[in-house]
Amino acid sequence: MDSHKYKVVIIGSGPAGLSAAARAAHYSQEGSSHLLLEAFSSPAKTIFQYQKGKHVMDEPGFLDLRSPMEFVAGKRETVLQAWEDGLKNCEVNVQYETEVVSISGENPNFIIKLKNGNEITSENVILSIGLQGNPRKLGMPGDDESDFVRYTLEDPAEFEDKTIVVIGAGDAAIENALGLAQQNTVHIINRKNEFARAKEGNLNAVLAAINSKSNEFYCGYNTNVKSVQLPDGNGQNGAIVLDTPDGDKEIACDCIIARLGAIAPRRFVESCGVQFPNDKPDSIPDLDNQYQSNVKGLYIIGALGGYPLIKQAMNQGYDVIEFIHGKEIKPADHPLLEQQFKLLPYAMDAQKVLELYQQRVPMFRRMNALAFRELIIESNIVIALDEELYTETQKEEKIARNAGVSKLTKLIKAGDYIFKKGDYSNSFYTIVEGEVYLDSGTGKKFTVGAGQFFGEMSLLSGRPRKAHAIASSDCILIETSRRIMIKLMNSNDEVAEGINRIFITRALQGAFSPKLPNKELVQLAGTVEMLEFKANEEIFKEGEKGAELYLIRSGTVSLSKGNVVTVQLQSGDLVGQMALMGNPVRLHTAKAAVRVEALKINRQQFITLVKSNPDEIKVLQKNLAELMKNSNSMGSVVEAAETVSFLLDKGLGEATNALVIDETLCVACDNCETACAETHNGISRLDRESGSSFAGLHIPISCRHCEQPHCMKDCPADAIHRAESGEVFIDTSCIGCGNCETNCPYDVIKMSYDMPKKPSLFAWMFMGVGSGPGEPKKVTIDKKAKDKGKKAVKCDACMDLKGGPACVRACPTGAAIRISPNDFVELVDGR
Amino acid sequence: MHQNLLKYKHYRYLKLFLVLAVASIALYFSQGEDQPANGGTLQGYILGITSAFFILLLTFLGIRKRSYSSNMGTVEGWTSAHVFLGTSLLLITTLHAAFQVGWNVHTLAYILMLAVIFSGFFGLFAYMHYPRILSSNNNGTSQDQWFDDLQEIDEKIKNLAISCRTGVRLMVLSAIENTQLDSTLFKQLRGKDGSKIRLQSGSKQLVTNKNQEIIIDILSTAIPNSQKQAEASALNEILTLFSRRQRLLKIIRRTLQVKAYLKAWLIFHIPITIALLAALIVHILVVFIYW
């Protein structure tokens, strides 16, 4: 046992740990000792394992770095070198290849047990082990990481004409296998009989590779690894023995890449006595303002503490050492907080305002203080002022802007729209002071006050705003983007439940206008069940007896009679109300056209709702009559209904703006593609001829601007947005990771280099300079574009063009139009 | 929702056409007794200037079509106007010329204009008629997919042919090798099947295999004559594949032909338009010089 007791031991040498260790080394000169432990053989393992030459970003740009370690955006190699140098220069006491097995005790008596049997004692412990965890190993002799058995793949291009066995069925395994497949023989080994965990794009790609005869790509389903035979010497082949449904099988190979996922660090963290607020996999331990966990003297920083960005993590590393040494410093992001509150009429310190706000909103009250701080910094603080004060404050704003402040309190005039009905914005608003009026434009009006929130409809359904929101004077709002809100809802049950409850309450209000006291309505909302249906799942069947109706929360539901789709319904619509308003036998089969979330309302709940406001029954009956009329008129024209079935089948149910070509008018001139390329830097975002056709309608490969865009799902740079007018677009912060390309089920996103500039039409026509209009067939990519790399490109519905989509406006015959599901009936009726 | 270019905005340009027709006829008959109808009267000038302006406007479609971010109407609107204004020129220019023709540059311009307009009528017919044929011919499959299918069938046939006797095998391969799909616009328009086959191995002579009929005949007679069962079943499969191939080739050839029709008229329409513009300039200059 090491008899020396350290002031602080830092576990994990990622960006957070490195920065903490470097700052601790500074205090070592004052006699306070430190030690940095790292299980791997070099610092920052996660970044070390990035692909060669990968660009490491230093987001968020507005935050300053506070660390003795250097860090600027750059190539992986440069970043790592700077840290190696920093470790030397700061004289950090570091031990590599030292794995910690357990931590026990609390301040000032921690005992840290190591894998080699040694024990270390310390007054404080900083956990900065990140989230990557340790890769799960094969679990048999010879499975240690070596040139033959690997658990990561840095660079697929490193391998050529080799035989490689990839083990695993997740996205990492599939991506590695596909990356290698172009120039190698690849076997992918799947324990199960399908790739159920894979993203749709990866799934399709791997199935295509398996089925294709042109490449050497093989898949073993229901296959386990039995043993590994290491190669005898350098350059020799090793082998793997597999347990397959047809008996044992040996494959000689050059390399085995096992992507079996990681052992999450949570269990280890819990073994130290740290508590987590819930059982969700992405839950973050409870920490105080100084990053201290419930175990006194045990601090958690970096990704494990909910701060996945390098710069943030490094700042935390610095701050936490200061706290341990009793220094009361303000966090590096304090100025950001001050700017957020700058134009508010308070004289309080920003930290105090933050605490006050958290108390104001019941839903946020029990939130982790750090998480709330993060929420405020990432949101906008909006204040609505009366004319006079507004003009005055605007001057103040101008001065601050001139001083170079980028993000400030957002000013609006009292009485202005926060959003308008029909806008495609999806931010979420929390009121901390004052009131906001919601006006549906159809006579329904609400007032929401301090502590309440609004905007949850569009946040959850992806549909346009259902009402105008108007700010009263002096009201103060927290405006949070959809991405941040979804992240919060995933990590905080209370917030998720609170929002869901209000969503249901307001949805019921919208659908039934009940005249119930608010308390009773909220209570009723609490009993309503939320159901989720996968695409193509049946909600109920024609001929069944039913006793409940459904209120669609997100997605599209199709109603069909026999095999013929007669109506389709969207979020906010009721499904199956006939069963409660007359005939209990279902007249239709209701099917989820895309993934659907719906609220199930039973007879009891329904009766309570409509009894409270009998006038509303007439409205419901009228709507139902309208639905029956539409359904029957569609049902009587089988061809039309078949066409709608086709459109839904091709995923147009979740579209908001899709290109549909009438084949009987299309003269195949491709002017639509040319126009697209010409208005979008030489790259067409639509492929006219590909895609599917039915009964003279053609759906080309082009973006449909989905209600809940699949592409937005995991964009690490947050580069994909939805414009207020509904267009989904990619901004210039795209890093070219290709996630959106993989996630899009409709193949409408491509990765592309910047095209060289085009000559003018006249220069091309009369002087033969460069290539003509449209996407150039042969093109040399210049060096600048190559250095920048491929970026994702997709249709933006020409949101920047005054006249609207160029594809439609360039069609000489009227064959191309853009429509949303609301237009289906008109589309097929007119044929 | 989809609306063809003639119906554009509730027949906006058809209505304009009718107004123009009535107005120009009225203008024609307003020419007095003392000065007989001619291009040189006031009315004649108005008709002439209108015609020249329309010709320029119609020519401008080529530029508007390529001004992809232009906000000046839609290309469909321009095309609709192009059709109706173009048609109205038949009447307006005839009235401008007051039915006089002769062996001169003026009549040359007139005839060139007629050629442009009538080639345009064919184009309009093609645009109205052929997309429907293309759509039902392709039946939801794109041209690239047809070619992919064809290639796949060819691969299958080649693999199966290995187990056939040499003579048949070589004929099968030569039928595939000498299948002809035309690449030039003119040949595509004709749509003639120039596919051939070599019946005797080693012989230089190729005979026609139009519509794959010869090879299909050969295969069907070879099946009862095959000595091995494996060969018979392979031949049977090849025969099925060739029948499928026959259908595919028909579809592809028809697709190419229809697409060629949709393009070919422009090859005529546009150069004559240029010639018309030249003749028009000469016509105007000559009128003023010899006034």
Image (cartoon, coloured by chain):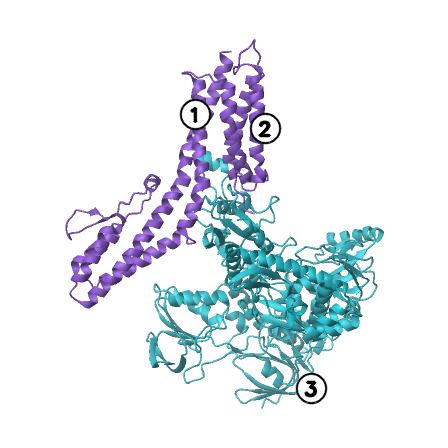
Chain colours: A cyan, B purple
The mark found on residue A108 in the picture is: 3
- Tell which subunit mark 1 falls on: B
Label 1 with label 3: CB-CB less than 8 Å:
no
Mark 2 is on which residue type? Val
Q: Residue furthest top?
A: B34
Residue A601: x and y in percent read 67, 71
Which residue is at 20% across, 55% downward? B218
Q: Are marks 1 and 3 on the same chain?
A: no
Determine which residue is flagged by label 2.
B19
Q: Nearer the viewer, residue A308 or A118?
A: A308
Which residue is at 68% across, 73% downward? A603
In the visual, does A607 lie left or right of A75? right
The residue carrying pointer 1 sits among few (fewer than 14), some (14 to 19) or many (20 or more) residues within 10 Å by Cα, namely some
Q: Are marks 3 and 2 on the same chain?
A: no
Above or below, A257 against B30 in this view is: below
- Tell which subunit mark 3 falls on: A
The answer to whether any part of residue A252 appears in the image is: yes
- Tell which subunit mark 2 falls on: B
In the visual, does A477 lie left or right of A92? right
For the residue labelled by badge 1, is the local secondary structure a helix, a strand or a loop?
Answer: helix
Determine which residue is flagged by label 1.
B112
Sequence-first tag of 2 and 1: 2
The answer to whether any part of residue A89 appears in the image is: no
Q: Residues under labels 3 and 2: Cα distance?
A: 98 Å
Residue B141: x and y in percent read 41, 54
Q: Residue furthest front?
A: A583
